[in-house]
Amino acid sequence: MATTSLDREILAPEKGYAISSQPYGIYVCPTCKRELELGPGSLYCHACAVSYPIRDGIADFIVEKLEENSNRSLRVLGKMDSSLLLDFAAYSYEKYIYPPVCNLFGGWHSTCLKELARDISDIVGSQDGVILDVACGPGTYGRRIASASRTVYGIDASMSMLRRGARYVERDCIPNVHFARAKVEALPFPAGLFDAAICAGSLNHFSDTVLALREINRTMKAGAPLAVMCFVVSCRGLFKYRFIRERVEKERVEKGGGYIFELPDLDRYVAEAGFEGFRPHTHGAVLVFSARRRPAEH
Ligand SMILES: C[S@@+](CC[C@H](N)C(=O)[O-])C[C@H]1O[C@@H](n2cnc3c(N)ncnc32)[C@H](O)[C@@H]1O
Ligand SMILES: [Zn+2]
């Protein structure tokens, strides 16, 4: 292996994960979870004989064609990622997309990004260490909680979103935020790494909620907090209308679209994925919940 001593130190889970000027050393192969060799412009898995390119400083762990994926969000990304339209969506995301989404789906004046960011930050708490931001978009939440003593690893399936996030990080001189392109179903991180995990605005999009939560759970330390923002059935917002819920369900079954959760189902999925202490807090149909990774049973 061509890893440096710094890489080896970073890759040893029992030592904890110091902040490093070499962020690629922390990644493992998303398929076999073995260490990767850093070469010029790529990370290589010897076991899988697969090379993961590094584009614009962002490691890309998605090698398959997303346009053929069974999940609708990923298919759309496969067709449109890095297009002008997606770059524009990433650019306007926080300012022009978040407010109408909160009002329409959460309910009029249900909440806003500022309040949600505070909720998520409260769940993560004040602890230092390494935080995972799953399906991070342009690093919406991760950028807001990174600090000199707290490193955030954001992953997302969209290069447009990640590049936009990297630009914000550079523009605002935010320390310790690293981005990689990856799917939640196959995270490029070793087990037991993270001190906390965030997943905001994305859980409704994943094809298999329990599988996604289990993969997040795998990468977290026992007892580490999970902070999620998602949409649930409520008497507020567009999802209060049964015909809209039926339409979404039809899209899910026929085209691999997203879910709208019933609260008791979500509680069950979170427990099935290995978390405990599910604590929901609603703003209309926008739900923020916390849970903790259950310690392993002996
Ligand atoms: C609504 S955005 C939320 C972004 C950000 N977390 C926020 O709250 O602003 C949903 C994001 O999920 C990403 N996404 C959807 N399915 C994914 C998957 N299976 N794995 C990784 N990212 C995914 C999309 O690329 C998109 O950026
Ligand atoms: Zn591999």
Image: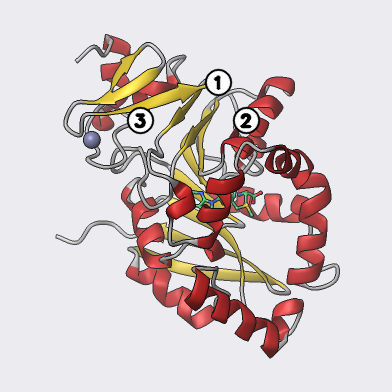
Q: Is the residue marked by circle 1 packed among few (<14), some (14-19), or many (20+) residues within 10 Å?
A: few
Determine if residue 202 is in view.
yes
Between circles 3 and 2, the one closer to the viewer is 2
Q: CA distance from mark 3 to mark 2?
A: 19 Å
Q: Secondary structure at mark 3?
A: loop
- The residue where tag 3 is placed is 27
Q: Which numbered disc covers residue 155? A: none
Above or below for 174 versus 296: above
Q: Secondary structure at mark 1?
A: loop
Q: Tell me the kind of residue under disc 3.
A: Tyr
Q: Locate residue 222, reporting x and y percent.
A: 32, 51
- The residue where tag 2 is placed is 163
Q: Is residue 266 left or right of residue 233?
A: left
- The residue where tag 1 is placed is 56
Q: Tell me the kind of residue under disc 2.
A: Arg
Seen at 38% across and 11% down, the residue is 40
Seen at 57% across and 47% down, the residue is 79
Task: Determine contact: label 3, label 1, CB under 8 Å.
Answer: no
Seen at 43% across and 62% down, the residue is 70
Q: Locate residue 234, reporting x and y percent.
A: 68, 81
Task: Determine contact: label 2, label 1, CB under 8 Å.
Answer: yes
Q: Is the residue marked by circle 3 packed among few (<14), some (14-19), or many (20+) residues within 10 Å?
A: many
Q: Counting residues from the N terminus, which is met first, the one under dot 3 or under dot 2?
A: 3
Q: Counting residues from the N terminus, which is met first, the one under dot 2 or under dot 1?
A: 1
The quadrant in which residue 108 appears is bottom right
Front-most of residues 107 and 38: 38
Above or below for 226 versus 271: above
The quadrant in which residue 217 appears is bottom left
The quadrant in which residue 201 appears is bottom right
